[in-house]
Amino acid sequence: MKAIVFKKEMLLSLEDRPYPDLVNPDDVVVRVHSTGICGTDRNILLGRFPARQGVVLGHESVGYVTAIGSQVPDFKVGDRVVVNPTLYCGHCHFCRRGAFNFCDNKTGAEIGVDRDGTFADYVRMPARFLHHLPPSMALDRAVFIEPLACVMNNANAVDLQPADDVVILGGGPIGMVFALYAQRFARKVIVVENDPFRRSFAAKLDLLTADSGHPDWQQHVVDLNDARRPSVVIETSGVLLDAAVDLVAKGGRIAVMGFNGHITAGFKVLRIVNNGIRVVGAGDYNGPIFPAAIDLAAELPLEKLITHRFTLAEHDQAFNLLTGNHDAAHPDQYGAMKILICSE
Ligand SMILES: [Zn+2]
Ligand SMILES: [Zn+2]
């Protein structure tokens, strides 16, 4: 089969890999239909997030069951499934306390990071990390279930409430999934983004936007928010945490998303202490969020975020759209939102 392999920083290659035969009795082999490119994939390629060299990337994925082990009672060949890519052991200190997201034995267990992922024709994984899809849900929507689970995890971490006004820093794919979620659950949503394509994309989905490239963008956000500071700020850009601390209202909450190992932040500690600001990192979502994300995906028009589809062999074109190599005249501008790698 074909697979997109992470060779080293700034180098992916399309390789022939053996079909993943069943190994354990609880294994399932999935024929991958499509996989979303995540900011994490981009950060791995750019050398900002650690991944095992030689691993098959890809983790936001849907497909069809093609083979099942001897101890898999709840799947049959042909079932449509979504991959929960964050495997856990179930028996370490944290797993025994239900904090599966902080499993001590994740090394070698994160699909598309250090265990072979879904930018491939097939993937093998334990049945308990696959979920059935509702019959009525299109695969184009289901492919957003994993990022939606991440969003719900962070929304829980900041205790998002209907009275909240939510400012999302960074209008990329994860920021936009958060925006569609918050549009449903909070009174106001403002997306802050310096890229004009992404701002107009957000505006077409009836979202308020502000330009973080403008020196007065924080004031614009306050103006858009009925002259108040936002109660919740979601930082997905990776580089605006200090601005988030400046911007958020007294008693406000900030969630830090965006996986970038090169970033450190400096901010005014007194603002946090004096104003009762909470800054939270939510980590990976915990297991029970995943089924809830499947249910909620049925209600959100997530497939509207798809702008491009490429085959496995077209991975260079796909990633170039996200790494600024697509338009020599405007190297800092994106021309894409969610990009799918289609295995079939
Ligand atoms: Zn992801
Ligand atoms: Zn564990």
Image: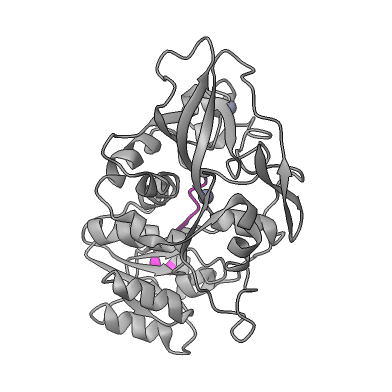
Viewer can see residue 260: no
Indicate the position of residue 293 as horizontal and vertical percent values.
Answer: 35, 42
Name the residue: 31% across, 46% down: 297
- The N terminus sits in image quarter: top right
Name the residue: 63% across, 31% down: 104
In the image, residue 247 above or below residue 184: below
In the image, residue 203 above or below residue 306: below
Say which quarter of the image contains residue 328: bottom right
Name the residue: 56% across, 27% down: 125
In the image, residue 101 above or below residue 281: above
Report the span colored magenta: 274-283
Residue 44 as seen in the image, left or right of residue 144: right
Indicate the position of residue 47 as horizontal and vertical percent values.
Answer: 72, 59
The colour scheme used to paint the residues is one colour
Q: How many marks?
A: 0
Say which quarter of the image contains residue 251: bottom left
Viewer can see residue 226: yes
Residue 121 as seen in the image, left or right of residue 208: right
Residue closer to the observer: 343 or 7: 343
Residue 116 as seen in the image, left or right of residue 302: right
Tell me if residue 27 is in the magenta stretch. Answer: no
Residue closer to the observer: 63 or 55: 63
Indicate the position of residue 99 as horizontal and vertical percent values.
Answer: 49, 32
In the image, residue 227 above or below residue 313: below
Residue closer to the observer: 325 or 263: 325
Indicate the position of residue 307 as horizontal and vertical percent values.
Answer: 43, 64
